[in-house]
Amino acid sequence: MVDDEAKSILFAGVGGQGILRASDIICEAIMEAGLDVKKSEVHGMAQRGGCVTSHVRYGKKVYSPLAETGSIQTLVSFEKMEALRYLKFLKKDAAIIVNTEEIYPPAVNMGDAPYPKDAIAFLKEHYNNVIHFNAAELAQKAGNVKTANVVLLGAVSNLITIDQSIWENVIKKSFPEKLVKINLAAFQLGIAA
Amino acid sequence: MKVLMSGNEAIARGAYEAGVRFAAAYPGTPSTEILEEFSKYDGVHAEWSPNEKVAVEVAIGAALAGEKALAVMKHVGVNVAADPIFTVSYTGTNGALVIITADDPSLHSSQNEQDNRNYARFAKIPMLEPADAEEAKEYIKLAFEISEKFDTPVFLRSTTRVSHSKAVVTLEKPQKYEDKTGFTYNVEKYVMVPVNARTQRVEVEKRQHALKKFVETFPENKIEINNLDVGIITAGMPYNYAKEVFPDYSYLKLGMVYPLPEKLIRDFASKVKKIYVIEELDPFLEEQIKAMGIKVIGKEIFPYTIEFDPGIIKNAIEKNTQVPVSPYKEELSPRPPNLCPGCPHRGLFYALSKSKAYVHGDIGCYTLSYMKPLEGLHSCICMGASIGMAHGMSKALKEKGKGKVVGVIGDSTFLHSGITPLLNMAYNHSAALIIILDNSTTAMTGMQEHPGTGYTLMGKEAKKVNLKVLVSALGIENIKVIDPLDLKATRSAIKEELAKDGPSVIIAESPCALFKRANIKLKSALKVDSDKCEGCKACLGLNCPPISWKKGVTKEGSKRKGISYIDKNICNGCGLCEQVCKFGAIS
C-alpha cells in the first residue's frame, strides 16, 4: 500500500476533543493492516484547554514518532483555527481535513484578540485538497456529539488504504459495547462527508 | 502478540515480564503511567510513596530483602532521592534495584530541563537509555540483569518522547516469579559508617572497572556500518530522529550511556571519516569521547536546549538556513492551559490576588494561576519550596513583610515535602501564612492517591492523614479550614490570618472538580441575564473557560458595550462568577 518512505498524519486540536483516542484508533488500524507505526502524544491537556497534537507515522519501517517540518502528507484539524497553527509541518501538496467547529482561545473569549476570519478560504488558496465540514454536527447526527473524533477518522479513512473490516474491528475494540453502534455510524458519516 | 504501547506501558510490561513484583514511585510527568500500569499486573506490589526519596528507600529495603525492586520518578524526582541513591551505589543491592528517571527535554511539564545522565557518572551507577517502546521493554529487563550480575543499582533513562509515544511492541511470556526473599546480616556492606564506606568505596571502583569491560561487548551498543564518510554516535530517541533523515550514514547506537565502551568507540571512529555526536541537552557523550582524544562534532552545531526532532538534526548537519515556514503570517491567539471549569483553586487565588500579598507557589495545577488575569502567585521553584521560601522572605523583609508573605501548596505536594519546612516555621517563629490547597488528590498528574486520600495505588482503603491535626502537631497554633468556593469566607480568612503575628495555616478544602470519587454535587450550569449584565467584565477576572464576553449587545440608558456569556456545555456550576457579579446578573 505504500512505498518504503514512512508517511505522516498530524492530528491537531484542543484538549478534550478526543484527539489521542482518534490517533490511537488509526495506529491500531495501521498495525492491523501489517505496517509499522509510531505516534507522539501530548498529555495532560484534556480539561485544561491547551493545544494538543499527535504525529502518526507509518510505513514499512518507522524510526521517528515525530515528523520533520515540511514533510507531513495529511493534517486532520479538530478545530478550525488550529489548522492554521501547524502549516509549517505540511508538504505543499498535503491534504487537509478540517472540522469547522470554532473553539475560542481565552484571549478571544475575553474580546482581546480576533478569531481568524476566512481560515477555510486561506487553506483553499494554499492547498489543493481541503476537506471541511462540521464534525460536531455530524457526530450529533450519529447520536453523540463526542463522536466527532471518529467522524474525522471516517474522513481520514478515505485517504489511506485500509480495509473497511479492519477499521470496523478496531472501532469495536476501542469502545464499550453500548457506544460501538454510534461510533460506527459516526465513522460512516465521516466517510461520506 | 504485537500491541501498540507507550514507552511507559512498555517499561511496566517489561518489568513484569522480567519477574519484577515490587515497585514504588511518586507521580510526576512524564513517568506517572509506569507505576499505574505496573500496578495492574497480577501478583505485584506497587505503592505510591509520599516522595521520591521514600520511594527509593522503600525499593532499597525490598532489594536488600532479595526482591527485584523498581523505583520510578521524573528527572527532578531524582534530586529529591539523590541522598539514598549516592550511597546505595556503595552498598550494592543484593536482590536488584532499577531506578527510572524520566527526563523532560523541552520542559513539556517541568520546572527545569536537567540531563540526568549526569547522575549516572556522578553516582557511579550504570545507565541504559532506550529509544522507543519496544526497546524500553527490553532494556528494563537488561537493567535488572545488570543489577543482579554486578550487585549495583541501575538507572533506566527515559525522556518524554520515549515515555509518551507509542510503538508496536511484541509481548513475551512473563518470567515466573521466584521468591528469593530473606535477609542475611552483613553490616560491613550495609552499615555505611566511614570505616565500612571506605571499603565499599573501593568496591565501587572495582565494579566500575568490571562494568567498563562488560560494556565493550554489551549487545545493545550497536555498530551499523553503511556509508563510511559519516559516522553518527547517538543514544535514545535522537537515534530515531537521525535515522529518519540520514538512513545511509554509519551509526554507533549506545544502549548503555554510562559507562561508555571506549574500545568500541575507538573501533567505530577508526572506520568512519567524520563523526557527529547527536544528543539532546548536555554534551554528555561528546565530552567523554573528546576526552578519549577522538575528534567529533557535537554542540558546535547542535542545540544545548530543547528536545530534538528530525528537522533539527538535518538542518544542523546540512547547514540549512532555509527551513519550512507556514504560509499563514497572522498571529494566532495561543491556548495556554488553564485551571478547569469549577476548579476550587480559582476561588482561592481570586481572593488571594486581591490581598496584594507576596505569594510563593509550589508544584501543581495551581501554579497555572500565576498567569493573567488571576496572577495569584509570584514564585515557584520546586516541590515543597513555597513554605521555606515564604518563611525566608518574611524573615528577611522584617516589618516590610508584615501581613504580606504567603506560601501556597497542594495537599499532595505538602505531604511530599512541605511538612519539614512547616515544622521549621513553627520552630523559628515565622510570621508567614501558609495555605494548603486540599483538593483530595494529586490532580496535576491525573488523580493519583496519596497519604491524605484514604486509598492506596492498589485501591485498598488506607489511613488518611488528618491535615489539621498534623499541622497542629507541628506546632502551628493558628489554623483555619475554609471552602475556597466561598469567596467571602476565603477573603476574610486570608485577611484575618495575615493580620496575625505568628505563623498561620489556612486549609482550603474542596475536591478537584474532575475527581469522580469526591462525588461533587454539581449545580446546573449558570446563566447570564442579558438584561441585568452591565458588561463590566468583572466575571472575566476569574479566567473561567466557559465565560466569554462579546461586543454588540447594548442597552438603553447604559454605557455597556457588550455582555458576558456562559457556555453551558462546560460550566460546572461552581458559583464563583455569581459571587463576583455586582449586578446579580449571573444565577
Image: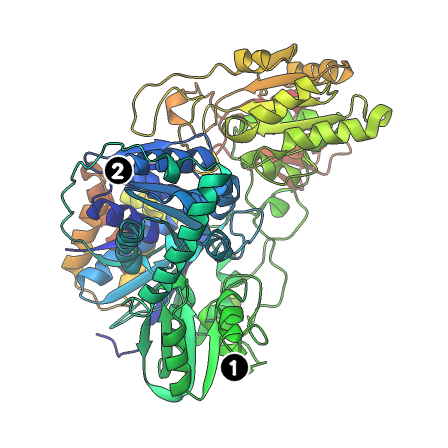
Say few, some or many: other residues with alpha carbon within 10 Å of mark 1 (under 14 / 14 to 19 / 20 or more).
Answer: some
Toward the viewer: B356 or B298? B298
| Number of disc labels | 2
Question: Which is more N-terminal, label 1 or label 2?
Answer: 2
Q: On what subunit does the disc labeled 1 rest?
A: B
Colour basis: rainbow
Question: Is B179 drawn above or below residue B296 in the view shown?
Answer: above
- Is B142 left, or right, of B103 in this rendering? left
Quick check: can you spot residue A77?
Answer: no
For badge 2, the amino acid type reads: Gly
Question: Is B62 drawn above or below residue B248 in the view shown?
Answer: above
Tell me what residue is drawn at x 42 percent, y 22 percent. Answer: B453
Judged from the image, the secondary structure of the residue bearing numbered disc 2 is loop
Quick check: can you spot residue B336?
Answer: yes
Q: Which quadrant holds residue B249?
A: bottom left
Task: Point out the residue furthest to the right here.
Answer: B399
Judged from the image, the secondary structure of the residue bearing numbered disc 1 is loop
Residue that badge 1 annotates: B295
Q: Which quadrant holds residue B258?
A: bottom left
- Is B204 left, or right, of B390 in this rendering? left
Say few, some or many: other residues with alpha carbon within 10 Å of mark 2 (under 14 / 14 to 19 / 20 or more).
Answer: many
Residue A65 lies, in percent from the top left, at 37, 63
Tell me what residue is drawn at x 58 percent, y 65 percent. Answer: B304
Residue that badge 2 annotates: B66
Toward the viewer: A147 or B444? B444
Tell me what residue is drawn at x 44 percent, y 75 percent. Answer: A91
Q: On what subunit does the disc labeled 2 rest?
A: B
Mark-to-mark CA distance, 2 and 1: 45 Å
For badge 1, the amino acid type reads: Lys
